[in-house]
């Protein structure tokens, strides 16, 4: 089918707006006219997922679209997301459309109709939009109502609401992971499905050009969304020297806010023989890094969830974070090391006043030993 096959009169022309590939206002993504098209794929179920921030959360929720498609093969899934996290969602399979949060997209979703809206966002401007979206079913978090506040939609969302509202509940009243809660809100039972991630081949190729394909790398992911989650730079440097002494190569990663730490570690550890790497990376390139590594050391951050997506041996450093909510119950490649302070985990209640210090109590010797054990265990499995 090509442009010359189009009916010559508008009376003979038709289109299929229920097709998965139909955009409206533009030809479909295959650039084909509807009459006679063999790629027609009718949508029978339309879903909207609302989750804007925290890149790691996008991966935590990544098994959900796959479950939705398994239950509803004709489903079309739209994900409303913040601009910073959009590159992550674009790498999650089974998501048909990624909408970046802004005024225009708010008007777009208000003009559309869905079979279900799953809202995992607590920001008032976003959660306040949810009840106004036309849908057969709403679940999750909303904002407004008679008390002008955040509230759960339905019984299934009450636990999720409590987790987003009271830190005490997160530390003492919860044993569920965020993935379990996302599934619960959507009406499913989580059965251990793995994270879903499909990194573009071009990003993989760029990382391969830097790191090669021979392996031997250990990733030191120094970043964290809050300062209280950060392990001291001196600890990272000491660990790096020990791992180099063991014969490993190091790739140092972190977010934009961690650039100074990454460069300092590179200066301290690099001996000029190519055994230590740190490069500015796009999110897609960062997402490819675990595929070239033998292990990762990280705090509770995006890097941890990327390691999980690859089933990579990972040593997880926990201070304020509660391992029960971030470590999947089926994961057997995670070694979690926790702060020895009695206030840990605090779920960011920051009884320390935000100064931190709990991460400092995780010793370099313990982390080094955990990396060695993780690599030995992985070698036994592979051998």
Image (cartoon, rainbow, N blue to C red):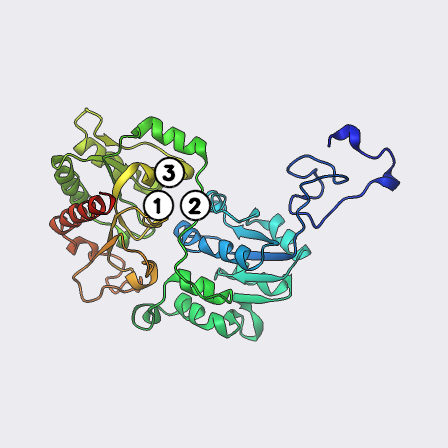
Q: Nearer the viewer, residue 265 or 367?
A: 367
**If the image is split into quadrants, where does the C terminus sit?**
top left
Determine the CA span between mark 1 and mark 3: 9 Å
Would you say residue 352 is visible in this rendering? Answer: yes
x and y percent of residue 64 in the render?
48, 57
Q: CA distance from mark 3 to mark 2?
A: 10 Å
At 16% from the left and 49% from the top, the residue drawn is 373
Residue 129 locus on image (x, y percent): 58, 61
Residue that label 2 marks: 197
Query: CB of mark 1 within 8 Å of CB of mark 2?
Result: yes
Position of the N terminus by quadrant: top right
Q: Earlier in the sequence, mark 1 or mark 3?
A: 3
Q: Earlier in the sequence, mark 1 or mark 2?
A: 2
Label 2 neighbour load within 10 Å: few <14, some 14-19, many 20+: many
User: Residue 163 location in percent, x, y?
Assistant: 39, 67
Q: Residue at the location (13% across, 52% down)?
A: 366
What residue is disc 3 on?
288
In-image side of 83 versus 372 (left or right): right
Q: Is residue 65 shown left or right of residue 39?
A: left
Q: Quadrant of residue 354?
A: bottom left
In the rendered image, residue 311, in percent from the top left (x then y), is placed at 32, 48
Q: Quick one: 377 or 96, which is closer to the camera?
A: 377
Left or right, 274 with respect to 61, comes to left
Q: Which mark is residue 213?
A: none
Q: Residues within 10 Å of mark 3 (few under 14, many from 20)?
A: many
SS label for mark 3: helix
* Residue displayed at 53% across by 56% down: 70
- Residue that numbered label 1 is attached to: 310
* Residue at horizontal 44 percent and vertical 56 percent from the top: 61
Judged left or right of residue 109, residue 93 is left
| Mark 2 element type | loop
């Amino acid at each position: 089918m090509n442009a010359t096959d189009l009916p010559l009169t508008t009376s003979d022309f038709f289109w299929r707006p229920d097709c998965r590939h139909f955009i409206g206002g533009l030809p479909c993504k295959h650039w084909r006219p509807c009459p006679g098209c063999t790629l027609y794929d009718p949508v029978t179920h339309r879903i909207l997922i609302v989750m804007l921030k925290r890149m790691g959360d996008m991966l935590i929720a990544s098994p959900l679209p796959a479950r939705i498609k398994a239950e509803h093969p004709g489903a079309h899934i739209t994900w409303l997301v913040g601009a910073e996290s959009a590159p992550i969602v674009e790498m999650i399979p089974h998501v048909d459309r990624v909408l970046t949060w802004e005024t225009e997209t708010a008007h777009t979703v208000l003009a559309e109709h869905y079979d279900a809206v799953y809202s995992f966002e607590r920001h008032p401007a976003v959660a306040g939009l949810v009840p106004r979206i036309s849908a057969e079913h709403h679940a999750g978090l909303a904002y407004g109502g008679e008390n002008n506040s955040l509230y759960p939609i339905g019984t299934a969302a009450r636990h999720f609401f409590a987790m987003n509202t009271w830190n005490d509940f997160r530390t003492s009243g919860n044993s569920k992971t965020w993935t379990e809660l996302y599934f619960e809100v959507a009406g499913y039972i989580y059965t251990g499905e793995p994270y879903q991630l499909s990194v573009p081949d071009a990003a993989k190729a760029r990382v391969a050009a830097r790191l090669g394909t021979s392996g031997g790398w250990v990733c030191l992911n120094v970043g964290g969304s809050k300062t209280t989650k950060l392990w001291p730079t001196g600890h990272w440097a000491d660990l790096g020297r020990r791992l180099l002494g063991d014969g490993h190569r190091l790739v140092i990663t972190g977010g934009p806010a961690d650039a100074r730490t990454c460069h300092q570690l590179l200066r301290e550890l690099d001996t000029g023989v190519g055994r230590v790497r740190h490069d500015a990376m796009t999110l897609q390139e960062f997402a490819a890094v675990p595929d070239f590594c033998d292990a990762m050391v990280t705090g509770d951050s995006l890097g941890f969830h990327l390691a999980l997506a690859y089933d990579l041996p990972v040593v997880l450093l926990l201070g304020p974070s509660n391992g029960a909510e971030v470590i999947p119950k089926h994961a057997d490649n995670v070694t979690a090391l926790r702060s020895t302070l009695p206030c840990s985990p605090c779920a960011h209640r920051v009884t320390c006043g935000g100064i931190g210090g709990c991460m400092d109590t995780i010793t370099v010797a313990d982390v080094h030993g955990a990396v060695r054990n993780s690599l030995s265990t992985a070698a036994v499995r592979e051998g």
